[in-house]
């Protein structure tokens, strides 16, 4: 089994990189664990308090559960991944069954900030992109997918996204084995990464 971590700032193009790599590999060998599924449940908080949650701070992630699930997958066990809603800031009662496969991709902005998780990653990738490009993607995404107004997005970016990126996410780039510049637009880097994965699998497991 090969465990790959793909990190990068919010709006950097991580999902595009993950989707592109997955498309270049046999579908049956890849399982994806998104960090976003492991945000701590906030159903105990009133709605107004939930709006103040800092999703860009490592303390918002239940890393112990994510690491436990990753360890179980490595041992060949299935896990029940949480389902998290940004709209309500709560976990759903239902879960998603995740099965172990030869390639596990762990994806999220904060995955390289946790030392215990980093130790479990065979390949650590950081998707880099210009701040302006990231901000434009964040604006579109938060309005379309998270129900925020334009002013809410700007305020959230100023109060949470930018300072947390500078404090936690950008510094985690130094732990990466591979840095993908230009985000999801860098097809050359994506092809090289996919080739590296195929090579490692052929050497160790094919």
Image (cartoon, rainbow, N blue to C red):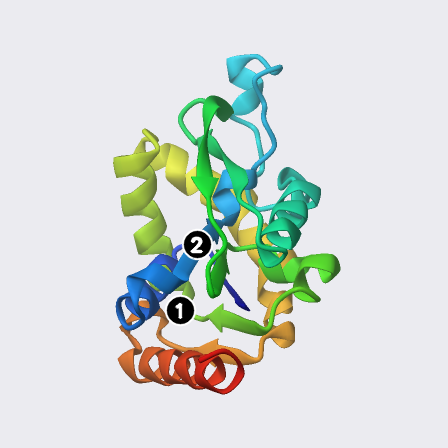
User: What is the secondary structure assignment of the residue under circle 1?
Assistant: loop
Quarter the N terminus occupies? bottom right
Q: Which residue is mark 2?
A: 32
Residue 8 is tagged as none
Q: Nearer the viewer, residue 168 or 117?
A: 117
Task: Please state which of the two labelled residues, at mark 2 or mark 1, is closer to the viewer.
Answer: 2
Q: Nearer the viewer, residue 104 or 126?
A: 104
Determine the image quadrant of residue 176.
bottom right
Find the distance from the CA under tag 2 to the CA under tag 1: 26 Å
Is residue 112 found left or right of 12 in the rendered image?
right
Looking at the image, can residue 13 be seen?
no
Q: Position of residue 98 (x, y in %)?
A: 46, 44
Report the residue at 44% width, 80% height from top. 206
Q: Are marks 2 and 1 in contact (CB under 8 Å)?
A: no
Q: Position of residue 179 (x, y in %)?
A: 49, 78
User: What is the secondary structure assignment of the residue under circle 2?
Assistant: strand
Q: Position of residue 89 (x, y in %)?
A: 49, 26
Q: Position of residue 185 (x, y in %)?
A: 28, 73
Is residue 173 found left or right of 183 in the rendered image?
right
Q: Which residue is mark 1?
A: 130
Mark 1 packing: few (<14 Cα in 10 Å), some, or many (20+)? few
Mark 2 packing: few (<14 Cα in 10 Å), some, or many (20+)? many
């Amino acid at each position: 089994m090969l465990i790959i971590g793909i990190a990068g700032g919010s709006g950097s193009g991580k999902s595009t990189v993950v989707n592109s790599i997955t498309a270049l590999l046999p579908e049956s060998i890849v399982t994806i664990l998104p960090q976003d599924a492991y945000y701590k449940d906030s159903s105990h908080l009133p709605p107004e308090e939930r709006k103040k949650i800092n999703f860009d701070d490592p303390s918002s992630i239940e890393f112990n559960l994510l690491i436990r699930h990753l360890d179980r997958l490595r041992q060949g066990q299935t896990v029940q991944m949480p389902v998290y809603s940004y709209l309500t800031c709560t976990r759903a009662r239902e879960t998603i069954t995740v099965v172990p496969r030869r390639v596990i991709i762990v994806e999220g902005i904060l995955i390289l900030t946790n030392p215990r998780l980093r130790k479990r990653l065979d390949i650590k990738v950081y998707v880099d992109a210009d701040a302006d490009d990231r901000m434009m993607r964040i604006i579109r995404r938060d309005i379309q997918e998270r129900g925020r107004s334009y002013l809410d997005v700007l305020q959230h970016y100023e109060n949470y996204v930018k300072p947390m990126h500078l404090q936690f996410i950008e510094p985690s780039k130094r732990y990466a084995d591979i840095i993908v510049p230009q985000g999801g637009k860098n097809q050359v880097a994506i092809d090289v990464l996919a080739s590296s994965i195929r090579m490692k699998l052929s050497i160790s497991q094919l």
